[in-house]
Amino acid sequence: MNGIAYFLIAILGIVTTLLGAILPLISQRWSLSTVQAGQLFSWQFASATIATVTSAWVFQKRAFKMPILIGIALSLLGVAFLSRVDWQFGRYCIACYGVGLGLSLPALNLAVSEANPVRRAASLSWLNAFWAAGAVGGPLLLLLTRNLDRFLLLLAIALSTCLVLSFLLPVSTQSTNPRELSRAAQPSGRLKLAIALSFAFFLLVGSENAVSGWASSLALPQFSNAYTAAAAPAAFWMFFLASRAAAPLALRKLREVQLMSGGLACAVVAVVAFFVVKNPILVSTACALAGLGIAPAVPVVIAEVSARLGEHNPASTVCFAAGGAGAATLPALVGILATKTGIAKAGLAVPMTALSLVLIAGLTSGKRQSKKLHVAVEPAD
């Protein structure tokens, strides 16, 4: 299963981050304002959120394979027509592949998590390392082709291959045991936990997409053209990939909350640096450090969702949907804030604030865990 799943999620990684890489190009082609450009993220991720919520029923009835198949087919449809449309219909193409991502990505994550119950965080880090490899490859492929239409054609061919391979993915299509579903759906005092994890997903996924999605456009003044500006998101995703790949090793020595908090502190500093620096090398470095810091956080939260709520619990689907809502909201807010202030990079205050909130929550959680551990090992009088 793993080999096919890794390939699928790598190509879906290109699709997920596609908008950030091509945003300067389609903004010019479609004559978009900053607010309109920001709204494209909402079209993609709001559609993904709706699809993820809807897929809760599909997960329970047909497990994970059906959402993967349908999701990849819709992603192919949206990408294939994107180069042939204008702003009016282009939004619907973006929404189409957004729905596809909303179905397929949670299904792949939950399927791999269920197949690796002992080392969930480590296995999910490896899976998402391949997703990040695709995210790195997208901007680099665009830089090599230097042609938007040719780039989208190659991506459509890759998605066609994914659609064929998804039929071979050895994931059960049988319904989950009704008793298991009943237990997963029963309220067990986990409402506060589900809300907290959903809020973390909202802020983390939203920040990830706000920084990476706007990196190319915000870095454009420091680069010669829109193709070379793709180096900024490429740097983000390259170090994002390295961080995801190194996470399983780091988790052998650090607790999950320690790894997440350290990474988020790095990311906050990097976003501030992105706002300040003007040199293209320093801009790329700031993007790289942001990717390095953000990367470990989402697998840690996914592991918490799987372990404490359960793969088949509808609350798990809500958590993924919250991530999509964050990705639909925060990048759009970046564009709105930039327009309101007249300063392009002012919108970076949005992901900086969001990451700071999760960092504070993580540090608070870490102190509570340390206190409980100290009490547990303290000898009795």
Image: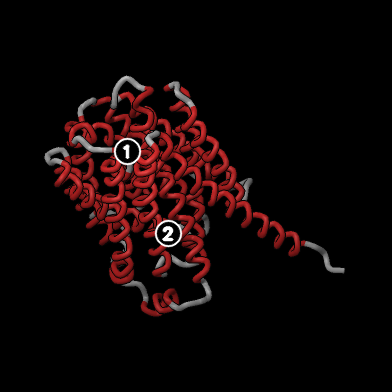
Q: Is residue 85 left or right of residue 359?
A: left
Q: Are marks 1 and 2 in contact (CB under 8 Å)?
A: no
Rendered view: 310 above or below 370? below
Point 84% across, 68% down: residue: 380
Residue 378 is tagged as none
* Image position, residue 312 (x, y; %): 40, 68
* Image position, residue 220 (x, y; %): 34, 27
Label 2: state its secondary structure. helix
Point 40% across, 55% down: residue: 323
Camera-nearest residue between 139 and 27: 27
Precedes in sequence: disc 1 or disc 2: 1
Q: Which residue is mark 1?
A: 20
* Image position, residue 15 (x, y; %): 28, 43
| Residue 365 in sight here | yes
* Image position, residue 311 (x, y; %): 42, 65
Mark 1 burial class by Cα count in 10 Å: few <14, some 14-19, many 20+? many
Point 50% across, 39% down: residue: 243
| Residue 160 in sight here | no
Rendered view: 28 above or below 199? above
Mark 2 burial class by Cα count in 10 Å: few <14, some 14-19, many 20+? some
Which residue in the rendered view is the most extreme toward the left? 84
Q: Which residue is mark 2?
A: 115
Calculate the distance from the C-alpha at mark 1 to the C-alpha at mark 2. Answer: 32 Å
Q: Nearer the viewer, mark 1 or mark 2?
A: 1
Q: Is residue 309 left or right of residue 28?
A: right
Residue type, numbered disc 2: Ala
Which residue in the rendered view is the most extreme toward the front? 341
Q: Is residue 186 left or right of residue 36?
A: right
